[in-house]
Structures are given as C-alpha cells and as structure tokens.
Image: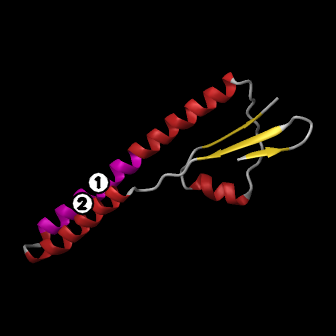
Amino acid sequence: MQEDHGGGQRLIRIRYRQQLGGLAKAIALVGVVAAVVSLNIGVVPSVACAAATAIWLVAVRHGGRRLLQKTAAIVDELALEMGLIRCEVQPTQSLERHEQSGAPRVEAQAP
C-alpha cells in the first residue's frame, strides 16, 4: 500500500502473510482422517498418523516462514537500491497483531 503524505513524501507499506494452500489443507485432512480411521487398528498407529501429520504441518509452516523472510530481505534490498529509506514508525494495534502472527513487516519511505 502506498500513502502520499504531500511534499513528495510517500510511505510504502508491505505486509506478508502465511497461509496453508489447498493441497496442504487436503494433505492435513487426509492425515487427520487416517489417524481417526486407524483407531480401529489400535492406538499406536493412530498416534503415529497424528504425530506424522503434526510434524509435517510444522515443517511446512517453518519452510513457509523461511521463504517469507527471504522475500522480505529481497524487497528490503531492492527498496534500498531504489533510494528508499526505512522508516521506524510505531505500528498501530492492527499491525502489532499482524506481527505477533509471525509475518515479517517491511516499510520504506521515498526520500
């Protein structure tokens, strides 16, 4: 989002958010269903299915977070190459909630 503050001063806000895609949701659902269905066989296979699904979801989340961090670093570098400066503005409450979700935040201001 770009905000014009007059006098040639613009503020550019960039937000990143991580969400599971359709395939990841489907795989997680299959894992949960497999854990429930395997209860008929026994507790051990059910716990194994549930644990494997949980570990897979954590790995997917971690990989997505690393990708977001790399993306934020690239955007930050490009902004600096364009002559934009980083502004250290206190975030609003909605931005604070967004940051607590773990998504990186990058802001730059044109000189």
| Residue located at (46% from left, 55% from top) | 19
Q: Quadrant of residue 93?
A: bottom right
| Residue located at (56% from left, 32% from top) | 73
Relative to 84, does residue 102 appear above or below in the rendering? below
Do the numbered discs 2 and 1 sit on residues whose CB atoms are within 8 Å?
yes
| Residue located at (30% from left, 59% from top) | 54
* Front position in the image: 26 or 54: 26
Helix, strand or loop for the magenta stretch, by majority: helix
Under mark 2, the amino acid is: Ala
Q: Magenta stretch?
A: 44-62
Say which residue label 1 marks: 55
Relative to 6, does residue 35 appear above or below in the rendering? below
Q: Is residue 8 found inside the magenta-colored segment of the image?
A: no
Q: Is residue 50 found inside the magenta-colored segment of the image?
A: yes
Under mark 1, the amino acid is: Ile
Percent x, y of residue 6: 90, 41
Say which residue label 2 marks: 51
Percent x, y of residue 80: 68, 25
